[in-house]
Image (tube, rainbow, N blue to C red):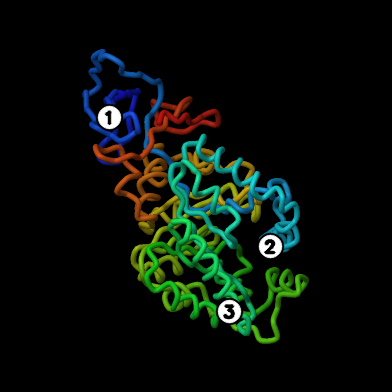
Amino acid sequence: MKRFTAQFIITNSGPSLKRGIITTEDDGTIISVEDTAGELEEKHSTEFYNGIIIPGFVNCHCHLELSHMKGGTSKGSGLGSFIEEIRSYRNRNNDNILTSAYSADKSMFSEGIVLCADVCNTSDTFNVKKESMIRYISLIEVFGLDPDKAESRIIEILDIAETARDLGLQYSLVPHSVYSISLTLLRLLKNESLNNRITSIHFMESEGEEIFLRNHTGPLMSAYKRSGLIPSRLELAGSHIDIILNELTKSGNLILVHNTFADKTTIRLIKERKNLFWCLCPNSNIYIENKIPPLNLLIEEGCEIVIGTDSHASNSNLSILEELKTLQSNFPELVIGDMVLWATMNGAKALQEEEWFGSIEAGKKPGLLLLENVDLQNMKLLPESSVRRLI
């Protein structure tokens, strides 16, 4: 049995506790949470920390199998060029895929991540996930613009899904994005994902997506032409709204990833779809498009916000804290309590794992982290803020 206390504890199950005491089993299961009203009396074996204790982080968007691409893409080149570089680079240095994935997994664990939704196009990282201290949900992703190849793409991801099932890994079948998938493939996928608990899709990541859908022009069209990816018959949905409301499974939760160019009209229309979560990966957005998501608009519209890291192809660190620090620096009015909620409880809800993760409550096993070097008076993150895993 262990006891932990700190200047503040953010439990996500009530107001922040000042010098409360958390008692856990040796395996990290919470036994009790005591509100001392700030009047801490010395208790045998209680560990006191100067900072804020919070639940473990939830990463709602990652690509572990791209970890070997760290430093392999150009910064600020835009989504079209980024996709080209991913295609040309991702299959190089195949021998490094596993070692890089193991290293990234270890790094995420040390950064306090306890639960992760990981997008994958292959089974390369399945053993990494099987052995990890992090709980993973594999989002097996399909894409393809050629409607005549749609059936073969579905067969490919069903084979990958069978491997995940044989290993006892939780998974869902999901689309990559509105700009990378034919209507035929979307509809075949919808039929295979009728019972999804979790679906995700890259959403409004670049300004060029709408132009590509509407006019079949713009930087994405140019990038696809250079890569030889435009089929003889181009068959796309008319808009982001059409895909979300009509072409995706209505089962379970839907995570919209990036939202860098989301606008009020789109947000309001697609909120007709229930169980919707908005995942922000600001460091990746800055890396690719040099733009930050419209956080204030999402908050004003009552969107359920969660946090992701994306991959090493567009991010030097797979750290939820670094994502939050970027949000803090761009939106100084934010307070730690709200950001922690997005990065913990909201993420656990999005992944339907709140039974164990997301809040510090008796019976849960959420992991315990210590936020250090923070502005405790104003409850703000600082550039030098850091996180330490306690459990």
Q: Which element is circle 3 on?
A: loop
Q: Does 199 sit above or below residue 117?
A: below
* Number of marks: 3
Q: Does 269 sit above or below residue 72?
A: below
- Looking at the rendered structure, the kind of residue marked 2 is Ile
Asked whether disc 2 touches disc 1, contact meaning CB atoms under 8 Å apart, the reply is: no
- Residue to which mark 1 is pinned: 17
Q: Which element is circle 1 on?
A: strand
- Looking at the rendered structure, the kind of residue marked 3 is Ser
Q: Does 314 sit above or below residue 329?
A: below
N-terminal label among 3 and 2: 2
N-terminal label among 3 and 1: 1
Taking the spot 50% from the left edge, 80% from the top edge, the residue there is 188
Residue 164, horizontal then vertical, whole percent: 49, 60
Taking the spot 73% from the left edge, 69% from the top edge, the residue there is 223
N-terminal label among 2 and 1: 1
Taking the spot 41% from the left edge, 32% from the top edge, the residue there is 369
Left or right placement of residue 369 versus residue 21 in this view: right
Q: Which mark is residue 182?
A: 3
Q: Does 272 sit above or below residue 37?
A: below
Residue nearer the viewer, 381 or 171: 171
- Residue to which mark 2 is pinned: 83
- Looking at the rendered structure, the kind of residue marked 1 is Leu
Q: CA distance from mark 3 to mark 2?
A: 17 Å
Q: Which element is circle 2 on?
A: helix
